[in-house]
Structures are given as C-alpha cells and as structure tokens.
Amino acid sequence: MTCGSQKLKLGTNSISNRQASASVGQILLMTEYTKFFGMESITVGQILLTKDCFTNKLKSKNIKNTVTTLWQLGAIPIVNENDTVITSELDKNFDDNDDLSARVAILLEASKLVILTDTDGVYTSNPKIDKTATQIKTITEITPKTLKIIKDKKNSRSRGGMKSKLLSAKRAYDKNIPVVIAKGSDDTVLLDIINGVPRGTLIAKEKEQL
C-alpha cells in the first residue's frame, strides 16, 4: 500500500484511498520480486489472502495445494494481504504482515518462521532510543512482562513494530513453530538462519531450541 500511495501521490486516510493504493502497490511489489528472483531464473507467484482464508476449510486446503504445487514446480509463492477488497469494519484484514506470516506458517506447518526487521532481534529496550539496550539472544516464553519492555517508535511506513512481531511470534510459538526475529538488511541473514547459524533472537520452547 505504501509504494502504491507514493506512486499515486495519494493519502491513505480513507478506505477507498488505501484500497486504490494497494491495487497499484501490489503490481509494483510483484514487479520487484519478479526482477529479483528472475536474476536467478526463479519464477514467482502471487497469493492474496484475507483472514477468512484461515477459517474456511476449503479455502485453507486450496491455499496449501497452491503453495505445494508452486514449490513442486520450483516457483516461489509471494503471499500478501488482499487489502484491495477488505474493509476494517468487516474485520477481514490482518493486523499487519507479521500477523499474516504467522498464520501462513501455521497453515503450512512450517518448521521455522523468520521475521525480518530493521533491528538485529529483540532488545531489552528500544536500541534506537536507549544506547544501553542489549540484545536478547533467546526467548523461551512470551509473557506480558516480555511485551512490556517493548517501546516501539512509530513508523508511517508500517502498521506493526517489535511488539507486533512478538505477538505474531507467540501465535507461531503456541503451535510449536520456532521463530527467529533478525535484521533484514544483512545479505546473509536468511542463509545463516537456514544453516543453523545463530542470528537475531530465537523464540522457541526449550525442547525446540535449534
């Protein structure tokens, strides 16, 4: 939606403006993904979801079938919110992409969920505000006390923040899916996580420590 609103030079203060921005933004986003993966001759596909896709058994089955087929064909599914057709009043949208990613991970029975952000994991306080903040390497339980230490700095480019990421991580954690929150600007971060190299913050029950 953000890149669409910038392209249209449109404010996002109304539902119709946000949906129009999302319509343009989805094309811009997929163009970038197509270019990026195309450099490695990898095909991408788009899957747009609303919240009811996870409560409707037939829709959930179709999502899993589509993702599985794309994987079998060597294509990468790009999953996003179908926010061109939803409205907040109908509660068909997600809190943010962190929420969406956790729901997709659960639906697909993922072995791990990686949430990328602009900081290298979870800190004892906001490292952008508090220079004495230290990184938390491992979290074995997400409690109200854990959430209380998070003080997000508002960002007009995103709906979520670290608290949102922890709440989404808890959704996956409760389904026994380990979660890693790490810095997305590092070129090697995903490869390291896949290979078991400790990066960012690992959120997992003790028996699921990687």
Image: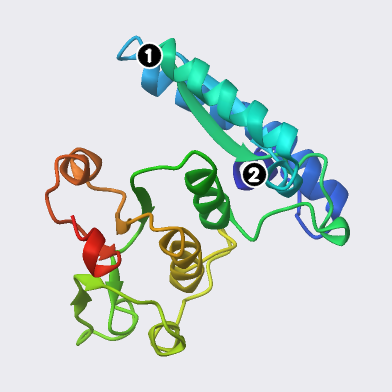
Residue closest to the eye, 136 or 156: 136
Q: Residue 55: x, y in percent?
A: 72, 48
> How far apart are the two marked residues, 2 and 1, measured between alpha carbons?
28 Å
Q: Find residue 50 and report its image quarter.
A: top right
Left or right: 146, with 90 as reference point: left
Q: Residue 87: x, y in percent?
A: 84, 52
**What secondary structure is found at the residue carrying circle 1?**
loop
Quadrant location of the N terminus in the rendered image: top right
Q: Is residue 148 visible?
A: yes
Q: Residue furthest left?
A: 197
Residue, disc 1:
42
Q: Residue 107: x, y in percent?
A: 54, 43
Whether residue 25 is situated above or below residue 156 in the rendered picture: above
Q: Nearer the viewer, mark 2 or mark 1?
A: 1
Q: Earlier in the sequence, mark 2 or mark 1?
A: 2
Q: Amino acid at mark 1?
A: Ile
Q: Residue 181: x, y in percent?
A: 32, 59
Number of dots carrying numbers: 2
Residue occupying the point 28% across, 48% down: 185
Left or right: 113, with 103 as reference point: left
Q: Amino acid at mark 2?
A: Gln
Whether residue 18 is situated above or below residue 65 in the rendered picture: below
Q: Find residue 72 and report its image quarter.
A: top left
Residue occupying the point 28% across, 65% down: 121
Whether residue 55 is situated above or below residue 39 in the rendered picture: below
Residue, disc 2:
6
- How many residues crowd mark 1 within 10 Å: few (<14), some (14–19), many (20+)? few
